[in-house]
Image (tube, helix red, strand yellow):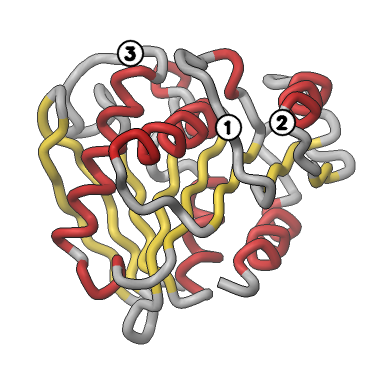
Amino acid sequence: MSLRTEQATCQGPAGLIEYTVDHPEDTPSGWALVLHPHPLHGGTRDNKIVTTVSRACVQHGLLAVRPNFRGVGASQGAFDRGDGETADMAAVVEHVFQAWPQAASGPWVLAGFSFGSAVAAQLYAELGDRGLPLPARLMLIGCAVERFRHRALSMPSDTLMVHGEHDEVVPLSEGMDFARAHQLPMTVVPDAGHFFHGKLLVLRQIVQSGLAGL
């Protein structure tokens, strides 16, 4: 668990971006950016899957950053189907490297759930275009990338993909299509739905295994 959580803002292309920082017990060994599900369907930085991933990262000694996408909470701007949100998150990455230099000197993790997975995948490509440091680990949970993709993608071979067997929002077959197109393995959680009800502990264990070796 985080011993200290704080709220902060930074400037993005559409205005202020609100985010939460979860601090590890000791000096952070790196950091994580965890992205939430669809803003128009109740997705926020406090989503249970987002906080589950954040806790796993904090337990691994990482500083965890959970932003609200534009139009959510105090984040300014309006929903932009992943395009503007990707630019916003690139601004957050640049901000973290300036605001949290000690954490940013270590490896970092980029994780996204549902709509957040689409932003995370495109942010990975955007970072390469901008010459910004790439994450040591990319995690796509409940992968909905193709629903909001606006650019060509090249995913790292060690991308961690996690999907619920009975996902009622993004069918498993859709996640498998993305995994197949990019030749990525996928971890399927038996009997889990989109929001991993009753399976959050399993999800946290998968994420913790994915953090091993950082």
Quadrant (top left, top right, bottom left, bottom right) of the C terminus: bottom right
Q: Are marks 1 and 2 in contact (CB under 8 Å)?
A: yes
The image quarter containing residue 209 is: bottom right
Q: Nearer the viewer, residue 180 or 113?
A: 180
**Residue at 51%, 47% in the rendered image:** 111
Horizontal side of residue 52 vs 35, given as left or right: right
**Whether residue 68 is situated above or below residue 22 in the rendered picture:** above
Q: Nearer the viewer, residue 104 or 37?
A: 104
- Circle 2 residues within 10 Å: few <14, some 14–19, many ≥20: some
Residue 9 picture location, percent across and down: 14, 46
Residue 173 picture location, percent across and down: 83, 21
- Circle 3 residues within 10 Å: few <14, some 14–19, many ≥20: some
Mark number for residue 154?
1
**Residue at 55%, 37% in the rendered image:** 113
Which residue does the numbered mark 2 point to in the structure image? 182
**Whether residue 179 is situated above or below residue 202 in the rendered picture:** above
Q: Earlier in the sequence, mark 3 or mark 1?
A: 3
Q: Nearer the viewer, residue 211 or 171?
A: 211
Residue 172 picture location, percent across and down: 81, 26
**Whether residue 84 is situated above or below residue 46 in the rendered picture:** above
